[in-house]
Amino acid sequence: MTPDLILFLILSFVAVGAALGMLFSHNAVYSALFLILNFATVAVFYLLLGAPFIAMAQVTVYAGAIMVLFLFVIMLLGAEQLRRAHRLDWQQPLAVVLAFVLLVEAGYIIFNRAGTFSMVEPSSPGYAGPQAIGELLFSEYLLPFEVTSVLLLVAMVGAIVLTKNKKKDAKE
Amino acid sequence: MVPVSYYLALSAILFTIGVLGVLTRHNAIVIFMSIELMLNAANLLFIAFARTFEQLDGQVFVFFVMTVAAAEVAVGLALIVAVFRNRRNIDIDQLSDMKG
């Protein structure tokens, strides 16, 4: 057991536990907080895999911006808990069975071919620093990068249009 | 040193939990968070393989996935707010008006 492996096992335990907590929390606010914990542990995995830039982006964009937006909307709508309503009885057991089948399939493929994948070696210095990523983004991936800015603009306009209060417009 | 297949297994487990969340929960916001969890599991795979093959392209892809996820969350939450304004409820089982 190398320190790397021990760290990996502890972190994956936390990550899976947080994901399960998100799944089983009855209160949506707790689900969001568990998901933030999950994103933070995944950011540490990114650091272990030699991706510091992506790890920081994960913390700021996912755990920061996106989850704050989620918490804001949950609290704005007061949708922490839903009223019980009529449910389909067979739906949940079927979902669990299908998810288990999916997991078994994925596990079969992964461990059937485990020999073809190597170990994660210690990285060479300078691999995946912010500078290397930036150079790649602004040379080879320049067009996708610019398209991304258009996408964000469209999303911003879409969010404003969708949440605009139409009743006020009708009165004017 | 950790074998890459361990990362694949972790990613598969997280993805399955996300699928379970989408299939079993009734709160639209929690379903949305489960989708984010699945995106995150896929990102973890990208980074793991980028590390294995010493290629940076995987990391650039994860960067793009993050921006698309941010845009998706903005529009999706706006949709949920709009639905809530009309129906006073975001339980997806109640949103069956289009049912034939």
Image: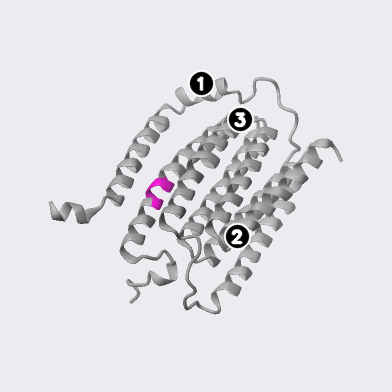
The kind of residue on which mark 1 rests is Glu
Q: Residue at x 74, y 48 (%)?
A: A114
Characterize the magenta stretch by its predominant secondary structure: helix
- The chain under label 1 reads A
Instruction: Confirm or deny contact between disc 2 and disc 1 (CB under 8 A).
Output: no
Distance from disc 3 to disc 1, alpha carbons, whole Å, reads 14 Å
Which residue sits at x=41%, y=57%? A77
Check disc 3 and report the residue beneath it: B55
Give the letter of the chain under mark 3: B
Q: In which quarter of the view is residue A153 placed?
A: top left
Cα–Cα span, label 2 and label 1: 39 Å
Q: Is residue B59 magenta?
A: no
Residue A110: percent from left, percent from top = 70, 52
* Circle 2 residues within 10 Å: few <14, some 14–19, many ≥20: many
Q: Which of label 2 and label 1 is nearer to you? A: 2
Range covered by the magenta-colored residues? B72-77
Q: Residues within 10 Å of mark 1 (few under 14, many from 20)?
A: few
Kind of residue at badge 2: Leu
Q: Is residue A143 visible?
A: yes
Find disc 1 in the rendering and name its residue.
A135
Q: Which residue is mark 2?
A: A23
| Circle 3: residue type | Gln
Residue A21 coordinates in the image, percent (x, y) = 64, 57
